[in-house]
Image (cartoon, grey):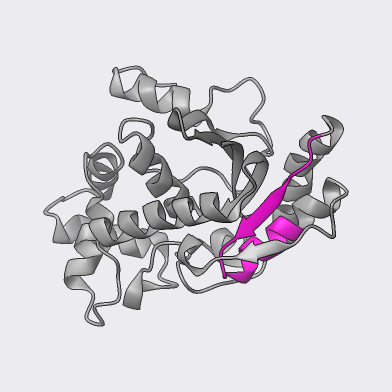
Amino acid sequence: MSLDIYLMRHGKTIANEQGLVQGWSDSPLTEEGIADVVKSAQRFADAGIKFDAAFCSTSPRTKTTAQLVLQTTNQPDLRIQEIEDLREYNFGSFEQTHRDELHQLLAEKNGFAKVEDWIHAYRNGSLHRLAQTLARIDPTRKAEGESEFLARLNSVMFEIIGLSPRKGRILVVSHGMAITGILKNIDPMSTLYESVPNASMTRLSYSLSEGWKIHSIGDGGLRGSQGRPSLLEASRAKRMGHIY
């Protein structure tokens, strides 16, 4: 078995534009979001890349994104398999909260006087402090803890392997925090706790002999991305004390 996996974050949504967190809730793609997805997908169409299977979460924003990609690569009839566990992190009762308000609350709950200090500690931490804190304080008990979230993502990626052909290119459309979690499961040092950009592509591979490999993180599809380091390079540099 040898698979090339193109892991894409959905295009920008209305909630993204408004600064609202959306995990299991949903909102439609913006016109800019649609354009960015098509721009990203066009690079693969221009290179003659075709997908042998396609997957997305059960959130409509990912299916819309997957449909746009396949239309652009001239594969509109390729079946898109929707898998529930590819969904974003569940924010529980904090769904649709403005991100600034959420980070202010998280800073207070973790003893930080300044929000920017909290964000730096969270991004560069060795565990998912956002998930751990929300799971602890959510009155509905629906917000996911780190272990629950990562276990779900680990399981779903192997489910996708089982549903895929033994060899080929696979399109997987998911979400920002979910993609970070997938990467952390493969290599905890591969990235910070920071979502890849909307409509960007992260490339993985899987084989029985070598397991999972990360080839690039968050490359492609976004305005101004050309000439900039990938998030994989940037994350490694930050951990070594260099800032891009």
> What residue sits 78% from the left and 48% below the top?
38
Task: Identify the image quadrant of the N terminus.
Answer: top right
Query: Number of marks in the image?
Result: 0
Residue 9 percent across, percent down from the top left: 58, 50
Task: Identify the image quadrant of the C terminus.
Answer: top left
Q: Nearer the viewer, residue 24 or 158?
A: 158
Residue 231 percent across, percent down from the top left: 48, 30
Q: Nearer the viewer, residue 214 or 108?
A: 214
Outermost residue toward the left? 111
Question: Can residue 92 be seen from the camera position used here?
Answer: yes
> What residue sits 78% from the left and 56% below the top?
68
User: For residue 63: magenta?
Assistant: yes
Residue 38 vertical position relative to residue 124 in the rendered view, above or below: below
> What residue sits 24% from the left and 62% below the top?
145
User: For residue 66: magenta?
Assistant: yes
Residue range highlighted in magenta: 49-67
Residue 26 percent across, percent down from the top left: 56, 72
Q: Nearer the viewer, residue 13 or 151?
A: 151
Looking at the image, residue 244 sits to the left or right of residue 139; the answer is: right
Outermost residue toward the right? 74
Question: Can residue 29 be seen from the camera position used here?
Answer: no
> What residue sits 48% from the left and 57% below the top?
159
Looking at the image, residue 168 sits to the left or right of residue 112; the answer is: right
Residue 168 figure quarter: top right
Looking at the image, residue 171 sits to the left or right of residue 181; the answer is: right
Looking at the image, residue 114 sits to the left or right of residue 90; the answer is: left
Residue 218 figure quarter: top right
Residue 184 percent across, percent down from the top left: 35, 41
